[in-house]
Amino acid sequence: MDPASLIGLVLAFGALVGMMTMEHVSIMSIFLPGPLMLVFGTTLGVGLASGALKDTINSFKSIAPAILAKKPNAQKAIDDLVGIAEKARANGLLALEQEAEGVDDAFLKGALQSVADGTDGDELRELLEDEIVSRTAQARQAAKFFMSLGGYAPTVGIIGTVVSLTHVLENLSTPDKLGPLIASAFVATLWGLLSANLIWLPIAGRIKRVMELQVASMTLLMEGVLAIQEGTQPRLLGSRLRAMVPKTDLPAEGKVVKSKKVSEDVAA
């Protein structure tokens, strides 16, 4: 699990609570049932109305996997593909069927099986690209859904404030009540902004980022398998795949060399 989401949300809400404490604002003063019900209920309602029920359910199901997701290990994927390329070069493409049985990644397993079955290179590329799109379709929809909630929430908050201010205007004859009424009126706007920027938009951003990492990982595996099918020399394959990955996602050069040295000693 990447702790970025947890750390970020704790920092954001912690800063909010800290500011309220420094300003001597009662935290409970913003937890008013009416504004909370309006902002969250209406926001979720219009979000649901803008799509299908299944989209909403799947979007909320996407939250936990996105938060718990680990960043793909690009170097390990490259090392695995280079190892597979060496075996394919020595034993032929039919040997990939046996290699596929020992692979945990479902995408890579299917790609290797397709190569072993003799699927044409162009057809295999099209098949894998379609699979990448289908595998990330739910994440794309989920990110879009939470982005829409982030857009609705501030407007809904303003609506709540306008409704509350209407009630304030009805009580102009009682000046002693105007202060608390005006303060509570702006709570809806506050929750609209808070929910959008501290809940919905961060969730959308997290899901989108995890999806981008998954697409990049599957694209790397796809290009590696297609290169293996073409008979690319293993060392060249490793260089080609490393060129597709940002340097920050690869270990330092010294660590790579050390890793290779260890693997060579084990092989010997």
Image (cartoon, helix red, strand yellow):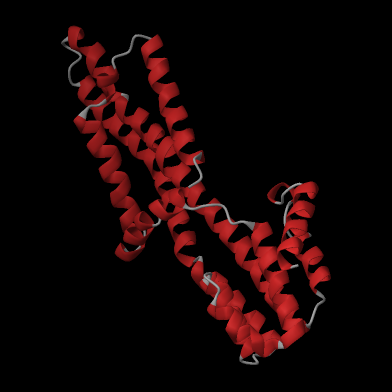
Corner quadrant of residue 58: bottom left
For this view, does 246 lie left or right of residue 155? right
Q: How many marks?
A: 0
Vertical side of 106 occupied by 119: above or below = below
Relative to 47, 256 lies left or right: right
The residue nearer to you, when weighing 138 against 186, is: 138
> In the current view of this chain or complex, which residue is farthest to the front?
268
Q: Position of residue 6 (x, y in %)?
A: 44, 38
- In which image quadrant can residue 60 be found? bottom left
- Screen quadrant of the C terminus: bottom right
Residue at the farthest bottom position? 118
Image location (x, y in percent) of residue 101 = 53, 80
Which residue is found at the position 69% from the left and 87% from the top?
93
The one of 186 and 104 positioned closer to us in this rendering: 104
186 in relation to 180, above or below: below
- Residue at the spot x=72%, y=88% of the render? 92
Q: Residue at x 60, y 77 (%)?
A: 128
Instruction: Give coordinates of residue 22: x percent, y percent.
Output: 40, 10
The correct choice, above or below, for 150 with respect to 13 in the image is: below
Q: Is residue 142 among the parts visible in the rendering? A: yes
Side (left or right) of 177 relative to 46: left
Q: Position of residue 144 (x, y in %)?
A: 46, 55
- Residue at the location (51% across, 73% down)? 106
Camera sees residue 127: no
In this rendered view, identify the residue nearer to me: 233 or 150: 233
